[in-house]
Amino acid sequence: YRPEMASHDPFLKRCLDLLFNLKPLVEEDVKTLCLRARDILEKEENVQAVQSPVTLVGDIHGQWYDLIELFQIGGDLPNTNYVFLGDYVDRGYYSIETVSLIMALKVRYPSRIHILRGNHESRQITQVYGFYDQCLKYYGTPNVWKYFTDLFDFLPLSIVVDDKIFCVHGGLSPQLDTLDHVRQLDRFHEVPHEGPICDLIWSDPDDRVSWGISPRGAGYTFGEDVTARWNLQNGLVLTVRAHQLVMDGFQYTHNNQLLTLFSAPNYCYRCGNQAAILEIDDTFQQEIRQFDAAPREKNSQIHVTRSTPEYFL
């Protein structure tokens, strides 16, 4: 991070200086930041168009040290363009700092970083898996949690890179055949319990063909035939999603027509997985970069307890 990168905006410079040093913003600054981010996000499409070169990033889950490591490996903004596939909060120890940093970067570089909605960007899920509790503990009120969860309603549902790569947090929906169907959805509300928006955010690929009931209790499982039909019908060469822990940080399935990316190394500080990002250069060449967990300072060692239900690690 270079201090001069936000020099023309004193508010953003102050926010980024704090957040790149793992210091949370005061409540009033979070409120201002969320309002500024909302102005940008509400103008973006359900299917936001992005051009290469760009680097795609999977789940982060409040692992701030690993997000900083990711920027060191993938490159700093604005020199590198990023697409984040959702799940910025919960599970990890630094949800407040992580989501604040990502939003501050979005406000500073709105055309350089694009961010999608994950299943954890919701009021219900964050009350169970850590973000609400972190906000309440640090700020003493739920106001900051409310500013962010209100903002999450404005996050786009999907991104298409160069009209060829479809990016989404979870997966596909039996109610959506085309990108135009996604464009017609009304996304500006809490993630529903069912329906096409829920499916985009919650679904998972499966070895079995066609649609199946999801063990998560939301969304569906979908087979290789579903992915092939979706890609073909929409002129796509690849669908990229996050949402599932994969031990190498990436996994190609469905005859290489689907890629799962997971960018939180040693997830929950115990899973032992690598993380990965996908770099797409300006000639549309694609390269996976894997990385391990960043060392945390000794005094920030996390003692993990399994106190929350694990709907799907």
Image: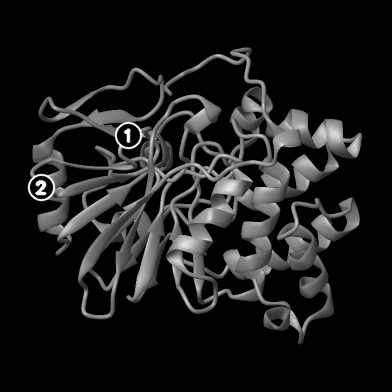
Q: Residue at x 76, y 40 (%)?
A: 145
Rounded to the nearest angstrom, the CA distance separating label 2 from label 1 is: 22 Å
Q: Is residue 50 above or below residue 272?
A: below
Label 2 crowd bin: few (<14), some (14–19), many (20+), radius 10 Å: some
Disc 1 target residue = 246
Badge 1, how many Cα within 10 Å: few under 14, some, many 20+? many
Label count reads: 2
Left or right of 104 in this view: 82: left
Check disc 2 and give the amino acid type.
Ala
Where's residue 142, x and y in %? 83, 36
The vertical placement of 222 against 304, above or below, is below
> Measured from the top left, where is residue 39 in percent x and y?
67, 69
Q: In the image, is 139 to the left or to the right of 212?
A: right
The N terminus - image quarter? bottom right
Q: Residue furthest front?
A: 298
Please indicate whether residue 91 sits to the left or right of residue 222 in the image.
right
Q: Residue at x 60, y 38 (%)?
A: 122
Q: Please tell me which residue lies in front, 300 or 306.
A: 300
Number of the label disc, if any, that sits on residue 228:
2
Q: Earlier in the sequence, mark 2 or mark 1?
A: 2
- Place of residue 248 in the rendered image (x, y in percent of width and height, measured from the top left): 30, 39
Q: Is residue 288 above or below residue 298?
A: below
Query: What is the quadrant of residue 52 in the picture?
Result: bottom left
Identified by mark 1, the residue type is Val
